[in-house]
Amino acid sequence: MASEVKALPPPCLEKAPETYDDAGLEDPVGPASIKRTLEAIREDALVRQQNVAQLRDWIAKHPHIRRCRTDALFLLRFLRSKKFSFLVASQTIERYLAARVLHPNWFQQLDVRDPELAHLVDIGFTMPLKERTADGCLVVLCDWGLLDPKIHTLDHSNRMHILLGEAYGEDAVAQCSGVIAIFNMEHVSLAHHGLISLSSLRLITRYVNNAFPVRCQALYAVNVPSAAMWIVNGFVGFLNEKIQSRFQMFRTFDELKEKFDANLLPQEYGGKLPKSEHIKAFREQCERYRNRMLALDEMSIDLDHSESYSRNAMLDDVEGGAVGSFRKLELD
């Protein structure tokens, strides 16, 4: 596969390069609704250009950022996910870089040729679907129960989701239109309970809430066995209110089809294309972006200070907030 896919070159990681990579500063080409989507995220050519320039200047002068991408598509990933709020986008970049330092076991060596990641790709643990929604949303399907409790840990799950996120992070239409995540919990058993805890869920959702640059349009859980309800409850309970409001649970994929276009799903779930076609496309995308993802390992930020994204602040365990507002979710 590696010889069949043309790999993209690694990005520049200099804080203040002599010339910046402006590829992607033009209007994204997408579905007919893309103009309405751009209006919703407050994007136009001038806003795009000014905000990218402002972020570049901010990165160049940042006292703690050592190495970071400054190409337009990387920065637009954060600006679009935060509707071009410079303040929130810049804070998210700080936390994204901090998360990479604090959790190297999640972020480092995102290589589809790694045997463990390759195996999870091949069995379809998590995969983006080949076709998008009518509005251009990227749809991600995860069969969480395919993790083997005898050989896998929660880190394998986290690495796979971050691999997918980085492989499609430069997709301009997905940056604008967002992502729909579908979790099939059918194969989750009691044996999987040893892989996860409320503290680990809180750690993961802290990253999702504060450092993950994506527009989450919907979050669905399907085929949730009673033994796995606490996992779903815990995960969603720690998410921010906006994502919580976009969460729904469905007993079966047939029930999901009343809300979601079934044609987009793999054939094995009632859709058109066989699972193998979706997996093949995912693997090819990972090969195409392999050099770019591996280069991310060299990005760095100093966390030994007193700022809100410092090592101590990011590791600080707040017992109020999410735990205090933990809510039980029930099937309708």
Image (cartoon, rainbow, N blue to C red):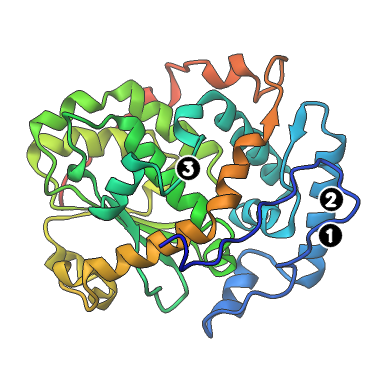
Residue 295, image x, y percentages: 62, 43
Residue in front for this viewpoint, 168 or 212: 168
On the rendered structure, is 87 left or right of 37? right
**Mark 1 touching mark 2, by CB under 8 A?**
yes
Residue 245, image x, y percentages: 38, 51
Residue 50, image x, y percentages: 84, 59
- State the residue at coordinates (18%, 23%): 194
Cα distance in 3D space between marks 3 and 2 = 29 Å
- Amino acid beneath label 2: Gln
- Is the residue marked by circle 2 packed among few (<14), some (14-19), or many (20+) residues within 10 Å? few
Cα distance in 3D space between marks 1 and 3 = 32 Å
Figure quadrant of residue 326: top left
- Amino acid beneath label 1: Gln
- State the residue at coordinates (84%, 50%): 54
- Amino acid beneath label 3: Leu
Residue at far bottom of view:
32
The numbered dot on residue 203 is none
Can residue 229 be seen?
Answer: yes
Residue in front for this viewpoint, 175 or 276: 276
- State the residue at coordinates (25%, 78%): 263
Q: Secondary structure at mark 3?
A: loop
- Is the residue marked by circle 1 packed among few (<14), some (14-19), or many (20+) residues within 10 Å? few
The numbered dot on residue 54 is 2
The numbered dot on residue 50 is 1
Q: Nearer the viewer, mark 1 or mark 3?
A: 3
Cα distance in 3D space between marks 1 and 2 = 6 Å
Q: Which residue is tagged 3?
A: 110
